[in-house]
Image (cartoon, helix red, strand yellow):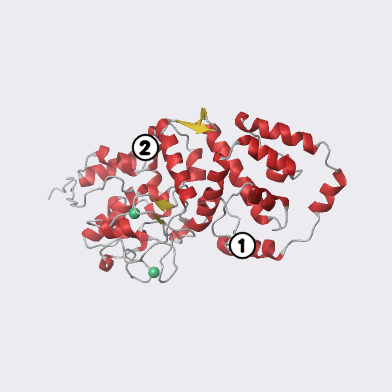
Amino acid sequence: MIGTTEVHSWFIPTTLQKDEALSSWLIRAALDSGCDPLSLTGALWPKWRIWSVDVDRGLSSEHLRALVNTTKIDESQFDSATLQNFLIKNELDSGFLDSWFLGLGTRNRKHRGGWQYCSQCLSKDVVAYFRLHWRFAWHTGCIKHGQRLHDQCPYCLSAIQPRRLQAPDRVMDCCSICKRSLSKIVGSSNDPHASAFQESFDHFLQQGYANYQGNLISLEDWLNITKLFIQLIRKILVGPLTGKGWMFLERLKIYMPHMEFISNGLAVDLLPVIERERLFSCVHQLLIIPQNQFIETALSLKMTRSSFWDKRSQLPAALKPIEDQLEIVSRHYPKNRALVEAFKPRSKQAVTRKFLRLKRKL
Ligand SMILES: [Zn+2]
Ligand SMILES: [Zn+2]
């Protein structure tokens, strides 16, 4: 008897949606075929533990070939489903993803963070699916429905982990832990400044350059300014409420949402949606206030460069006027006072924050 070498292909009726992430499609394809995601991917890639990596970042040519050969789906259909192509389309380097793409904590399939979603989008879908852009760290709200994205199950408070769904769950808008529907909840309104930040970010990526203080600047510089403003807000957040940082925000009339929320101090791509919304809301307000107002307010409070940024941070040319003015104040700053401030006892809030950060890392 002669052994057969024929390669069998499958018909997968699940259509990839326009902005759907590859992992979402794989999970839906499995559920539509009546099996667990793990079984489907095990059959597609027998030697690859796909769920131990972040598949939405992209497939190697070898893994993509295996997928195309088995499913007979055109390769180009997967183009918009991974970040590989998002980077190529927007001429970004892979470092961008490390800062701005939400980590799911894929180690051993136990996620520390969760995928974001809009309950309204899920409930309006003919078949619920998860969008790739819900994994963008700068996306904190659904512009279409005017509500903040969720990043945990509202019932059992677990992180959203669709890859842990099982065949009997059948649909993606089901919490993989408590099995309740994620689309039947009403969301809170999104913060208007955080939404404006999100829209500018998307727009700048699309056009390939940015706008700051009425000038056209490179995307790289704008991302740098954004990071420096995030650093500034985080520094103020951990400082005492009676400190100059808070007075600075108050004088500039910068509104801060979710004041009560205690930061866990993790990198932006690991922060919960509420904390990112708070940060981006403040950053957007800082981006749009005239620079001379920023400088005047800082000078009136005798603030130095180190009141805002770590001295190792390089400031882009667009922030040079701020740096130059604050340097003048620094030269008159008594050195012994800086030493005293470095050895101040930690506040209760700072200790709680450290504890929360440790807890999240475990
Ligand atoms: Zn929506
Ligand atoms: Zn749940």
The quarter holding residue 200 reads top left
> Label 2 is placed on what type of residue?
Asn
- Would you call the spot at circle 1 few (<14 residues within 10 Å), some (14-19), or many (20 or more)? few
- In the image shown, does 290 or 187 lie closer to the viewer? 290
Mark 1 residue's CB less than 8 Å from ligand 2: no
Name the residue furthest left: 1
The spot of residue 146 in percent (x, y) is 38, 54
In the rendered image, is residue 187 in sight?
yes
> Label 1 is placed on what type of residue?
Leu
Q: Residue at x 87, y 47 (%)?
A: 336
- In the image shown, does 256 or 276 lie closer to the viewer? 256
The spot of residue 69 in percent (x, y) is 23, 42
Q: Residue at x 62, y 29 (%)?
A: 317
> In this image, 69 relative to 304: left or right?
left
The quarter holding residue 39 reads bottom left
Residue picked out by circle 2: 85
> In this image, 176 relative to 338: left or right?
left
* Ligand 1 sits in quadrant: bottom left
Residue picked out by circle 1: 358
Label 1 and label 2: CA atoms lie apart by: 35 Å
Residue 126's tag is: none
SS at mark 2? helix
Give the quadrant of the C terminus: bottom right
